[in-house]
Structure formats: structure tokens, C-alpha cells
């Protein structure tokens, strides 16, 4: 089990990483760069859910993180296929 003070430190670093990814989403310069920024934010959210689940010792948060990761991966594949110009 993770101590809550350690959790706050981890979450502060993850928030800094999200802010850097938001800058990448805003600045671009291309659409794939923006998609990578959004995918990075999704990954950070998944890590945050797993850390929180470990901190409060609840498995449900980890289960939700797994489902969210699967949906994030599938949506990234669809967006990449769209940007490539392919059919669904």
C-alpha cells in the first residue's frame, strides 16, 4: 500500500507531465503530434488510476484503468487509420 503523502508527490509529477502534454496538443505543429499528446495524456490518466487504486487498496480502480487503456488504444488506432486516409 502506498502512503498518501507519496501519492501526492506522484500525482504532482503526473500533473506536470499532463501540462507538458497539453502544451504539445496546443502547439502541434501537425495532427499526429496532437494525437500523440492526447495519447500521452490518456496514458498518464491510466497510471494515475492505478496509483490511486494501489494507494487506497481497491481493485476496482485498476479494473477501470484496464478498460480505459483498451478503449484508449482502440481509439488511437481508429484515429491513426483516419489520418492515414484509410477506410474503417
Image (tube, rainbow, N blue to C red):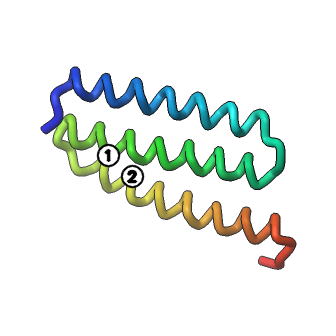
- The C terminus, quarter of image: bottom right
* Whether residue 10 is situated above or below residue 81 in the rendered picture: above
Point 36% across, 42% down: residue: 49
- The N terminus, quarter of image: top left
Residue 45 is left or right of residue 79, and the answer is: left
- How far apart are labels 1 and 2 at the CA level? 6 Å
Residue corresponding to mark 2:
65
Locate residue 55, reporting x and y percent: 21, 36
Looking at this rendering, what residue extends furthest in the bottom direction? Answer: 87
Closer-to-camera residue (8/75): 8
Residue 67 position by quadrant: bottom left
Q: Secondary structure at mark 1?
A: helix
Point 86% across, 72% down: residue: 85
Locate residue 41, reporting x and y percent: 56, 42
Point 27% across, 28% down: residue: 7
Residue corresponding to mark 1:
50
Circle number at residue 7: none
* Whether residue 78 is situated above or below residue 51 in the rendered picture: below
Closer-to-camera residue (65/17): 17
Point 54% across, 47% down: residue: 42
Callout 1–callout 2 Cβ contact below 8 Å = yes
Q: Residues within 10 Å of mark 2 (few under 14, many from 20)?
A: many
Locate residue 24, reporting x and y percent: 70, 38
Q: Residues within 10 Å of mark 1 (few under 14, many from 20)?
A: many
Closer-to-camera residue (16/48): 16
Task: Mark 1 or mark 2: name the one nearer the start of the chain.
Answer: 1
Looking at this rendering, what residue extends furthest in the left direction? Answer: 1
Locate residue 70, reporting x and y percent: 48, 63
* Whether residue 19 is situated above or below residue 69 in the rendered picture: above
Q: Secondary structure at mark 2?
A: helix
Residue 9 position by quadrant: top left
Amino acid at each position: 500500500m502506498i502512503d498518501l503523502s507519496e501519492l501526492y508527490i506522484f500525482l504532482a509529477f503526473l500533473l506536470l507531465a499532463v501540462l507538458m502534454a497539453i502544451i504539445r496538443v496546443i502547439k502541434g505543429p501537425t495532427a499526429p503530434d496532437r494525437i500523440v499528446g492526447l495519447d500521452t495524456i490518456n496514458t498518464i490518466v491510466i497510471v494515475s488510476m492505478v496509483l490511486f487504486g494501489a494507494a487506497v487498496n481497491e481493485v476496482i480502480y485498476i479494473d477501470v484503468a484496464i478498460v480505459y487503456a483498451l478503449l484508449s488504444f482502440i481509439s488511437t488506432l481508429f484515429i491513426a487509420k483516419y489520418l492515414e486516409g484509410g477506410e474503417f
